[in-house]
Image (cartoon, helix red, strand yellow):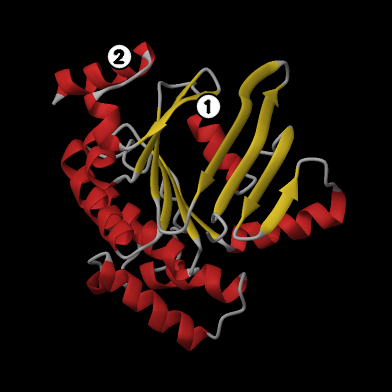
Amino acid sequence: MHHPIVKVSNLDKYFGRLHVLKNVSLEVPEKQVVCLIGRSGSGKSTLLRCVNFLEDPSHGTIEVDGVVVPAEVKGKEKNQLIHDVRLKTGMVFQEFNLFPHMTVLENVIEGPVTVKGMDKNQAIALAEQNLDSVGLLFKKDEYPSRLSGGQKQRVAIARALTMEPRVMLFDEPTSALDPELIGEVLNVMKKVALEGMTMIVVTHEMGFAREVADRVVVMAEGELIEDTSPEELFANPKDPRTKALIDRYRTSE
């Protein structure tokens, strides 16, 4: 049994007095695709953002590919550990966060060259390979303003992959897109999953969860209320709150 790529242990998160994550533990083995679902405010995005310290855990331990960061660690040591964790995680947000004054290719090589110190020619080769993989190599010299939302998000995925992460974190990557553009982004995510990337995906796209996820984790009020295969979840949801989520999806299909 090899180590999980991501291991969250007894995670608590408070915003002031608001207890948004309550003793959450989650392990994600290599190459597994986990979808996190739940209503708005259930804590799913906060959990995802704690994995690479965009949010600072109040209590508990985050481990990514062998880098262990207990919430108690402070100062320089903590900053170094967070840096090490971020090198191992690729993140794709709702917004695309591309630099408007840089071409697509420049956006994609920026991280590897400045953060990892990768040789520029090597970064370009890797970037072109990833842009090709998301179907956008022909746009490499365009500026982001010339791209559709779906294309921007596909560039953001290529950019994250070019950092060669051990795990990809997706935070509702299609929720800001026009409906007709959602499919192209989900297809790219499916391809990344099939290529063996470990993925944690916060999403409302139940069809994607059903088709691509190895596991679906359901959150409610800051707790994990179900953690099972998509088949089992859709056929036989145990918690009434999960059932409500799934019924709402069925009626919108």
The amino acid pointed to by label 2 is: Ala
Which of the pair 208/136 is nearer the observer?
A: 208
The image quadrant of residue 40 is top left
x and y percentages locating residue 228 in the rendered image: 37, 34
Residue corresponding to mark 2: 244
Classify 10 Å Cα crowding around label 1: few (below 14), some (14-19), many (20 and above): many
Which of the pair 138/11 is nearer the observer?
A: 11
- Label 1, label 2: how far apart the Cα atoms are: 17 Å
Residue drawn at 26 percent across, 73 percent down? 132
Which of the pair 74/8 is nearer the observer?
A: 8
Residue corresponding to mark 1: 43
Q: Secondary structure at mark 1?
A: loop
Q: In the picture provided, is 194 more to the left or to the right than 228?
A: left
The amino acid pointed to by label 1 is: Gly
Which quadrant would the C terminus be assigned to in this image? top left
- Whether residue 148 is visible here, answered yes or no, is no
